[in-house]
Amino acid sequence: MVAVVAVLAIKAWVINPYRIPSSSMEPTLHCAVPEPECEASRSDRVLANRFAYRFIDPGRGDIVVFRPPPNAANSCPTTDVFVKRLIGVPGDTIEIRDNQLYVNDEPVAEPYVYDGQVGRNFGPVTVGDDQYFMMGDNRLSSCDSRDWGTVPRDNLIGPVFARYWPITRIGFQ
């Protein structure tokens, strides 16, 4: 009984597993065929640290599990949680022009972006206080902050820190 309570407590407050359901994070995190644009036969399973953002600020480049804002349902199929890359922190100005991401008017190297396609021209937009700008690594197939705006800090669940399934892709982020 104590073990069950301990496992449930860890899952609720410390570490929780998540499955990657869509191609928005390809090629960094795989989803499973037959979903469109998925590269793997099995979806990656990841672990998120649910208490990290109580002690540290979310950082640009983090892969984050979060609850989508309500207006995300107007733009894309929604699930209880999304997994995306944090692109902009409060005060940042985000813009995409000529297949290049700019944060605060500085070009950002993004070697993780699927097929080198950074996405359609967008912005500039400035990220508000306690808000975060999220985008998938597969920009051409990601419904993200470009579509539904920023994510309040209270919606952030935690950063992804490890991939635990499939066995051939076990690793730390």
Image (cartoon, helix red, strand yellow):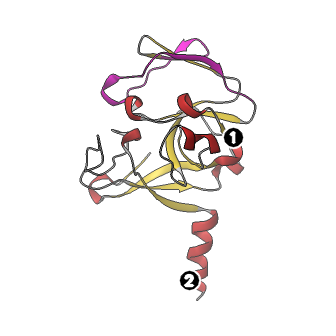
The answer to whether 145 is drawn above or below residue 32 in the figure is: above
Is residue 15 in view? yes
The answer to whether 51 is drawn above or below residue 98 in the figure is: below
The answer to whether 165 is drawn above or below residue 154 in the figure is: below
Image quadrant of residue 4? bottom right
**10 Å neighbourhood of mark 1: few (<14), some, or many (≥20)?**
some
CB atoms at circles 1 and 2 under 8 Å apart? no
Which residue ends up furthest to the right in the rendered image? 129
Circle 1 sits on which residue?
A: 152
Task: Report the amino acid beneath label 2.
Answer: Ala
Q: Nearer the viewer, residue 104 or 95?
A: 95
Percent across and percent down for residue 141 are 38, 34
Residue pictured at 42% horizontal, 22% vertical:
119
Task: Report the amino acid beneath label 1.
Answer: Pro
Per the rendering, the mark at residue 3 is: 2
Percent across and percent down for residue 93 are 63, 19
Lower position in the chain sequence, tag 1 or tag 2: 2
Residue pictured at 57% horizontal, 32% vertical:
60
Q: Which residues are magenta?
A: 101-128
